[in-house]
Structures are given as structure tokens and as C-alpha cells.
Amino acid sequence: MPDVIEERAGVPVLVCDPAGPPVVTAQDALDLIGAAFLGATVVAVPASRLDPSFFSLGTRFAGEIMQKFVNYRRRLVVVGDISWHVETSSALRALVHESNRSDHVWFVPDLDALDARLGATIQPAG
């Protein structure tokens, strides 16, 4: 399946195909942001599409990518099991914890968890 914009929990989300091109450069991230500008406010990227350097904070790749999403006012959601990365890096564990407390970048295990998280952030009208 290609990357597609879907409404999930009432929020337009660019759901990226796990078999899509890997995100190995800042330009790759900008390409996803550009695709999101077609109507999505959230970009759900499978962890498997992220270059391993994303999970090695010393490379600064994660910070560069996350900052691009913040600058363009799109929420980045990393979807998938990153437990191995988190278990081997206390810095990454802290980043994931702090990111999940904010509104800009989230790490979730699957799309169901994303739906639950999005549903919890929707404020009732009135």
C-alpha cells in the first residue's frame, strides 16, 4: 500500500507504508512533510522505515528530523516496536518518555495505540 491520508480518531493522518522508502536524510523527512501538506496534520512513520541512525542519538539525526516536523507544524508519530533501541540507550529512553508527554512527537507501538492517543487529545466542542 502506498502512503495514504486516513482519518483516524477524527484526525487526518498520513499513514506511511512499512514497505515505503527509508527515511535516511533530512530531505526524506521533508518529502513526508510535503505529502502531509495535502491534508494531514499527523505523519505516522513505521519505525522500520527510519534509518538506524535515528535511534542513535549521538548522530543527531533524530533531533534534526523531529525539528523539521515541529517547524512545519506536523506531528511525527513513530509507529512500531523500538524496545531493543530503548533498552540499549538510556538517552533514547528519556527522549521517548519526554516526547510522549508532548504534542509534537510520539512513539507508539501500533496504529491502535495511535488511535487511542489521538482520541484522548480531541477536546469536545463547546
Image (cartoon, rainbow, N blue to C red):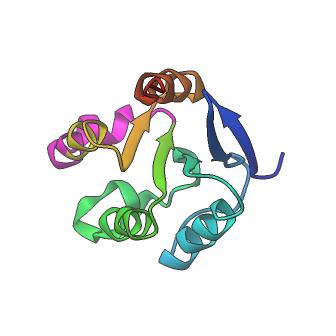
**Does residue 97 lie above or below 91 as drawn?**
above
Residue extending farthest to the right is 1
Residue drawn at point x = 37 percent, y = 48 percent: 105
Q: Quadrant of the C terminus?
A: top left
**Does residue 97 lie above or below 73 as drawn?**
above
- Residue 2 at x, y percent in the picture: 81, 51
* Residue 61 falls in image quadrant: bottom left
16 displayed left or right of 78:
right
Q: Which residues are magenta?
A: 80-94
Residue drawn at point x = 43 percent, y = 27 percent: 123
**Does residue 46 lie above or below 73 as drawn?**
above
In the image, 76 versus 94, the foreground residue is 76
* Residue 31 falls in image quadrant: bottom right
- Residue 24 at x, y percent in the picture: 52, 70
- Residue 49 at x, y percent in the picture: 58, 53
Residue drawn at point x = 16 percent, y = 48 percent: 91
